[in-house]
Image: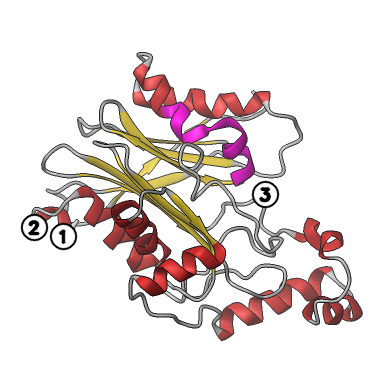
Amino acid sequence: MEVLRRGGSALDAVETGIRLVEANADDHSVGVGGTPNLLGEVELDASIMEGASLRAGAVAAVHGYPYPISIARQVMERLPFAFLVGEGAELFAAECGFERAELLTEEARRLWQERLARMLTPEQCAELIRRRGTLEATAALVEDIRRGHGTTNLIALDGHGLLASGVSTSGLGLKYPGRVGDSPIIGAGNYADNRYGAATCTGYGEMAIRAGTARSVVVYVKMGMSLADAAGEAIRDLRSVALPWPGGMNVIAADPWGGHCGASTRPGETYLYMTEDMAEPAVAPRRHIPLDG
């Protein structure tokens, strides 16, 4: 909010706000201290989008760089592409002058080892750590799939009426190496169009990828729905994708006139919002849209 109060752009506000979370080693959903994959490696994904021009940048499967949201923005600003992954994203980060850092903290390592120990025998754990055997056999260990997922998402509206949106994550706990969810995929986990609104998603990303959930919200607004109804309808679309669901979905959305809302497949979910005249963020309920309704 301080960025916007100083007259900064929505893009600057989104990048700055998400970087604060990426730098927090106590938050195991993103950046330094993010939740490791099956092999105990932290892989980061992020995307950022500008609603006025539909410009976007995204990175996925990034190792060793704690601020993927900033790399994603540089992809948008400096390259004729929208999406870089893995070694290519890391090469570009180095060319941009971003500093490498150790992402796996001792706390995250301990949690990873404890999670494996709850699900595997000591022999299986040892084989996995030595990278022996077939990882596919343990891919079903993806953790926390029925609970809220640790993804940071942010939508900002600046003084010029311009929208921007961003998402950053370390992905599902114990994910298969190289797995990419919806967070860096424009249209799935993140979308902004200044004519209608912006939406971002958290949850089981494969659902949003298959249904194009973030852009669906914006399209439904374009078709004449209110922002809240559009978010709800985008979640209802998920009912058409094959059941059973291994996890839920959350959406936040905002429009260029200052409206905002949240929706979730789970009851009792909330989101934070803040306007320029507020001293602290406020909590608002998300509309509950059950998948089996």
Highlighted range, magenta: 205-217
Q: On the rendered image, what quadrant is the C terminus found in?
A: top right
Q: Are marks 3 and 1 in contact (CB under 8 Å)?
A: no
In depth, the one of 43 and 96 nearer the eye is 96
Tell me the amino acid under the disc marked 1: Glu
In depth, the one of 266 and 74 nearer the eye is 74
**To which residue does mark 3 refer?**
146
Mark 1 and mark 2: span between their CA atoms? 6 Å
Question: Is 98 placed left or right of 110 in the picture?
Answer: left
**To which residue does mark 2 refer?**
6
Please give the name of the residue rendered at 42% of the width and 48% of the height, measured from the top-left corner.
Answer: 82
Q: Main secondary structure of the magenta part?
A: helix
Q: Are marks 1 and 2 in contact (CB under 8 Å)?
A: yes
Tell me the amino acid under the disc marked 2: Arg
* Image disc number at residue 150: none
Residue 293 lies in the magenta stretch:
no
Secondary structure state at the residue bearing disc 2? loop
